[in-house]
């Protein structure tokens, strides 16, 4: 089971940027490929998928609420997943979680926003955007 540790959260004003990192205990280029994703959960709300990447070929998937503002990427040499968040809005305020599931691209495309499909989770990092 892959272990995940997030970092990079913090407080920022609306319109600002943050980059989240997720360090994985296993390399992305082992024989098993992963669907790696970022989820977020605001107080009183359900956990929602934000973005995902299939480590086999770098295919990416985004929720419509963040498309064009957030970018998910992977660094295979560092075993690290990133989420670059630009033009942040107050509604982006939430606890952000990194997640992973051993899966192929079709599975990633179909289930990237479904938290129940992911096996491994980080502890979360808080992002607070003030208006």
Image (cartoon, helix red, strand yellow):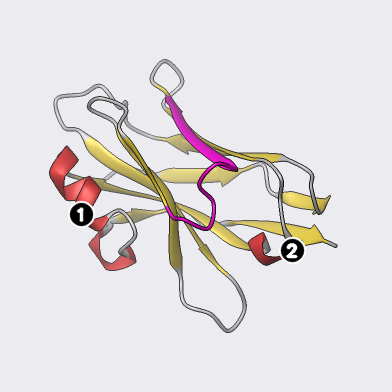
Name the quadrant containing residue 61: top left
* Quarter containing the C terminus: bottom right
Residue for point 23% across, 47% down: 108
The residue sitting at 71% across, 45% down in the picture is 87
Mark 1 vs mark 2: which is more N-terminal? 2
Q: Outermost residue, top direction?
A: 77
Who is closer to the viewer here, 46 or 110? Answer: 110
Instruction: Find out whether the residues at labels 1 and 2 contact each other: C-beta distance under 8 Å.
Output: no
- Point 24% across, 38% down: residue: 34
Given residues 78 and 95, the one toward you in this image is 95
Disc 2, SS: helix
Residue 81 in percent (x, y) is at 46, 34
126 left or right, relative to 49: right
- Which residue is identified by label 2? 90
Please report the bounds of the magenta region as a residue range. 63-74
Q: Is residue 45 above or below residue 78?
A: below
Residue 7 is one of the magenta-drawn residues:
no
- In the depicted view, which residue is nearer to us: 117 or 112? 112
11 lies above or below 44 = above
Checking the image for residue 61, the label placed there is none
Q: Which residue is mark 1?
A: 110
Residue 73 place in picture, x, y as percent: 46, 30
Residue at 58% over, 84% down: 44
Residue 21: image x %, image y %? 56, 37
Dividing the picture into quadrants, the one containing residue 55 is: top left
Q: CA distance from mark 1 to mark 2?
A: 28 Å
Residue 125, position as x, y percentages in the image: 62, 54
**Relative height, residue 124 to residue 28 (above, below):** below
Q: Tell me the SS state at disc 1.
A: helix
């Amino acid at each position: 089971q892959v272990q995940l540790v997030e970092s990079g959260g913090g407080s920022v004003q609306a319109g600002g940027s943050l980059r989240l990192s997720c360090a994985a205990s296993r390399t992305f280029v082992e024989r098993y490929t992963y669907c790696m994703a970022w989820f977020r959960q605001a107080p009183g709300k359900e956990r929602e998928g934000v973005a995902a990447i299939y480590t086999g070929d770098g295919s990416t998937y985004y929720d419509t609420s963040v498309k064009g503002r957030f970018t998910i990427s992977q660094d295979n040499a560092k075993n690290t997943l990133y989420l670059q968040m630009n033009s942040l809005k107050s509604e982006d305020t939430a606890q952000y979680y990194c997640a992973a599931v051993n899966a192929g691209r079709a599975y990633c495309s179909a289930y990237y926003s479904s938290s129940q499909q992911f096996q491994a989770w980080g502890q979360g990092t808080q992002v607070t955007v003030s208006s």
